[in-house]
Amino acid sequence: MAKKKKNASLNIDVSAIKDPSIVRNLSYEQLDSLSEEMKKYILEITSKYGGHLSSNLGTIDAIISLCRNFDFLKDKIIFDVGHQCYAYKILTGRNLEHLRERGGPSGFQKRSESPYDHFEAGHSSTSISAANGLAIARDLKGEHYDVIAFIGDGSLINGLALEGLNNAVQGNHKVIIVVNDNEMSISRPVGGFAKMFRKISVSSFYYRSKHAYKKFMGSTRFGRWIYGGTAKVKDWIKRHVLHLNLFDLLGYAFIGPIDGHDIKAMDKAFKRAKTIDKSVVVYLKTVKGKGYKYAEEDQYGHWHGVTQFNVETGQIEVNKKTISWSKIYEKILLDSMEKNKNIVTIVPATGVGSELGPLFNRFPERTIDVGISEEHAMTMASGLAVSGLHPVICIYSTFLQRAYDEISHDLSRMNCNATLLIDRSGLVGKDGETHQGIYDEAFLYTIPNTVIAMASSIEQSLELFNESLNKHGVFAIRFPKENIYDFHVIGSSVGFGKWVKLKQSSNFNLALVSLGPVVNTLNDIFARNNTDLTFYNAVYQKPMDEKAIDDLTKHKRIVIYNPYATKYGFVDTLIQKLNSERYRGTVDFCCLPNIFISQGSIKEQLEDTKTTIEDLLKIL
């Protein structure tokens, strides 16, 4: 159990709070004390288990105020991105011990976890559209409750959020949109919307003046006549003198900016929002990482998502004997961009996770962070490609699936040359269902003019990247989240579309086909045990090595092992290819099931899905 956190004046064990009623009768001084204790508790939990730290420290005060003004067993709140909900989990009766571990609380809202969770998402920018749907359903059913979309961390610039924002103001289905503006995405946000949001604080005088003027003029009949007669003058002033923002122009009622750490001010804002008879935006200004020095001063996103760390020193635990696959490709990119001026790197707000900081520092003009805009990243890449440049899009597998149409329609259909560096391919562990990178291989197979490959060594990583620059269309290079320990070369130079034969059976009884870093471990096991089998490293999953497949058909039995994807990509395609070659032997496979795999360690997820090396060895 985590050490219990006590508030001396309230005698409250933060980890044992049962429901939100606790915050409704406390003084503001007591609420500030409670907020501090919740900060300490979240710091302690994330230092032990990892998780999303900065975002949650910045939202504690806002969530306290929301829980004072709404009944979330009846009213419905959606957090966007879902990782901002730790304080909400605490106030709705959930101990955060074993956060994101198997059997512990999720790092996101989870409907099966609590009646207070009404929606769930691990990707950004879904809250407004979902809230609009909830509000329409509420009104069609004649029910009465408030629907709140709590959106922050740069999520509002995504196309889906803007589509929702455009539609939610129509039809008189009221939603309350709470914008948590901490002037950050994962790192510092980019683009025109970020500039607009930074100007909103300048225009706060306008909103206060507008409310006071309307209230004063509406108190008499003559005043109301004057108010109506000056509408055109007011509109002219608004357009030409005052700073307006997107929300006001779209037709939302607008409240703010409000200090997102002033609970009393937020109480007033939320009470007012409840009385307004149309959709309303409550605009909060918060500090990401509030209350923790290292997180508050972070401009690059290092404290957005954390592994285990020392709270006192801010030292993050790092295994210096290993290197991440993200870092391997960052080093390859750094060297390649130095030599090749046509390479332009694009990243959708995940530059920190993919360890691309040195790239932004060295090539600021050719390294572009588009924010949380995966679709835009792909179509922009097509514009670069048809202009003769070579775009490299660094993206997590789970976010790549949001841009399927753009890959198909805008990149592959025109046979544009582009490199996809697909980070977090395979199981990701603690983030669970919403972030598993196991589906991209299958859906990329359905798109023409695409290449799919996965390296098992640093040397192969470099060869694959260099090959991706040779005009093969969309060239997808997948790599997993885990670090690499082995640096030795596996096999000789691969060659485009080729596999590497690591062992040859003496009797053609058994052949194994696998891919990715797990090949290293398997090769060592077979060498130690003197296992008699033919062993292929299928470096290229698309196209396949026709010569290797012809060799496979000589064996009595073939086993395919892919712990980085589901059956519906490489495994199924290879089986179909063997069938088309009229192979009459036995084919078995061991790969990830096509399900949403819940949180836990990668080792636990492999065990749960019977996809470990041990499971493979049982069927060999």
Image: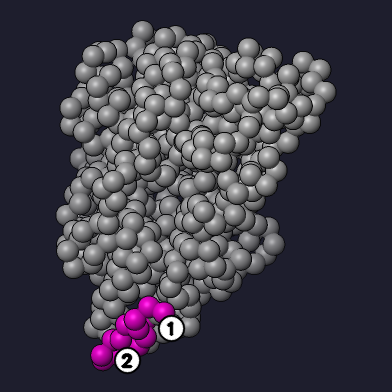
Answer above or below: position of 47 versus 473.
below
Question: What quarter of the picture does the C terminus occupy?
Answer: top right
Mark 2 residue crowding within 10 angstroms, few (<14) / some (14–19) / many (20+): few
Residue 119 lies within the magenta run? no
Residue 5 lies within the magenta run? yes
Identified at 32% across, 55% down, the residue is: 306
Query: Looking at the picture, how far across and down is residue 145, in whole percent?
Result: 56, 68
Say what amino acid the circle numbered 1 marks.
Ala
Say what amino acid the circle numbered 2 marks.
Asn
Query: Looking at the picture, how far across and down is residue 382, in whole percent?
Result: 43, 17
Identified at 42% across, 44% down, the residue is: 482
Q: Please tell me in which quadrant of the rendered image residue 510 appears.
A: top right
Mark 1 residue crowding within 10 angstroms, few (<14) / some (14–19) / many (20+): some
Q: Please tell me in which quadrant of the rendered image residue 204 appears.
A: bottom left
Region of the chain picked out in magenta, as a range = 1-14
Q: CA distance from mark 1 to mark 2?
A: 11 Å
Which residue is label 1 attached to?
16
